[in-house]
Image (cartoon, rainbow, N blue to C red):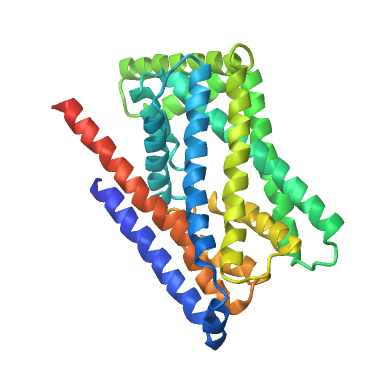
């Protein structure tokens, strides 16, 4: 880990701990101890185990998508790159900063750069489709089955905005996929930006290299629509399993803390998870720290006792942030050790 990453890690953890401390101070009171007497530790442990299962779903998605293209990537390698991805995403602005890690690790496993890039981009396309559909279904169900539940207008607006953002990103991908000239034009601008201080020869060499990546990318995308259709099927399947499993974890934490399980709690928790996912994609702080804690406390204060909000946020962030940091750090160290052996 270089000095820049260490600095980001310290900033990220520092902000998270400070905000968590503030949330706990403002929510813990005499009722907290009484409420915790109904706590079910087994469900809280189950919540952590479910998150581990989600990481396995993600690794299987990558492995099977790559296999549909003719690449045999070891399952452990996929698990390791996913964990390393979560570490980088936790210390970089927004939680989608780990894509370069996944692309790099897939190329180290023998994939061509364009193929690896196509797989990672298709992952995000599947994420966008599932999240957009999920948001629409949840908001519809909220209005039809739980119309008596009064949510702030800002929540409803954010839900529709979330569905719009995911849908727009998916449509943008299809526009680029159907019109290669847009992809080549974009890559030309990126190449020109990166080469603005280089000689003409270096600029041309970089552009040719990028042009090869783009060509390879479009070839791979076309394969997903042809002979590699199984990659799409597995991609969508494990994307659904991943997000449903991740979003249900918050519900199990609530029940584990003694909150009465109800259909309304389940549905509202899903909606809040969708909204928080969108919020954390905005590159404001490293790993979304601070923003995540405040969003969680603000949303879940509407559906669980205030005395439990701070404890809920603490457990949630341990599972989704601190556990990712620990597992991701170990995975990253394994990659560093491998690279060191390669050099030697």
Nearer-the-camera pick, 53 or 93: 53
Q: Position of residue 127 (x, y in %)?
A: 60, 38
Nearer-the-camera pick, 291 or 87: 87
Nearer-the-camera pick, 64 or 105: 64
Q: Residue at x 36, y 46 (%)?
A: 328
Q: Residue at x 42, y 25 (%)?
A: 191
Q: Position of residue 222 (x, y in %)?
A: 60, 14
Nearer-the-camera pick, 242 or 325: 242
Outermost bottom residue: 30
Q: Residue at x 57, y 66 (%)?
A: 256
- Describe residue 315's horizontal placement relative to residue 222 as left or right: left
**Image quadrant for the C terminus?**
top left
Q: Position of residue 343 (x, y in %)?
A: 17, 27
Outermost left residue: 344
Q: Residue at x 24, y 50 (%)?
A: 3
- Describe residue 175's horizontal placement relative to residue 118 as left or right: right
- Describe residue 138's horizontal placement relative to residue 190 as left or right: right
One can see residue 118 in this view: no
Q: Position of residue 299 (x, y in %)?
A: 64, 66
Above/below status of 217 relative to 126: above
Above/below status of 177 relative to 320: above
One can see residue 132 in this view: yes
């Amino acid at each position: 880990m270089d000095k820049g990453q260490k600095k980001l890690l310290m900033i990220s953890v520092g902000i998270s701990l400070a905000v968590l401390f503030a949330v706990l101070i403002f929510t813990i009171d005499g009722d907290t101890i009484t409420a915790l007497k109904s706590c079910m530790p087994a469900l809280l442990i189950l919540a952590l185990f479910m998150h581990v299962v989600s990481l396995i779903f993600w690794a299987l998605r990558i492995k099977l998508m790559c296999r549909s293209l003719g690449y045999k990537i070891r399952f452990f390698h996929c698990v390791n790159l996913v964990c390393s991805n979560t570490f980088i995403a936790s210390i970089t602005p927004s939680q989608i900063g780990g894509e370069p890690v996944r692309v790099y690790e897939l190329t180290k496993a023998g994939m061509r750069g364009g193929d690896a890039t196509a797989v990672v981009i298709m992952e995000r396309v599947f994420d966008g489709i599932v999240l957009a559909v999920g948001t629409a279904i949840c908001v519809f169900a909220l209005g039809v089955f739980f119309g008596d539940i009064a949510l702030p207008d800002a929540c409803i607006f954010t839900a529709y905005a979330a569905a719009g953002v995911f849908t727009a990103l998916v449509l943008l991908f299809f526009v680029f996929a159907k019109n290669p000239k847009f992809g080549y034009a974009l890559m030309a601008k990126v190449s020109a930006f990166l080469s603005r201080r280089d000689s003409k020869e270096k600029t041309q060499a970089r552009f040719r290299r990028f042009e090869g990546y783009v060509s390879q990318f479009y070839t791979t995308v076309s394969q997903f629509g042809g002979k590699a259709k199984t990659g799409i099927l597995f991609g969508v399947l494990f994307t659904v399993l991943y997000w449903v499993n991740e979003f249900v974890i918050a519900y199990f934490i609530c029940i584990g803390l003694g909150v009465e399980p109800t259909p309304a709690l389940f549905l509202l928790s899903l909606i809040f998870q969708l909204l928080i996912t969108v919020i954390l994609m905005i590159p404001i702080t490293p790993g979304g720290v601070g923003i995540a804690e405040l969003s969680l406390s603000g949303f879940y204060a509407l559906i669980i006792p205030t005395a439990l909000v701070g404890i809920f946020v603490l457990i949630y962030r341990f599972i989704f942030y601190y556990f990712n940091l620990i597992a991701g750090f170990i995975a990253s160290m394994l990659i560093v050790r491998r690279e060191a052996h390669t050099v030697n």
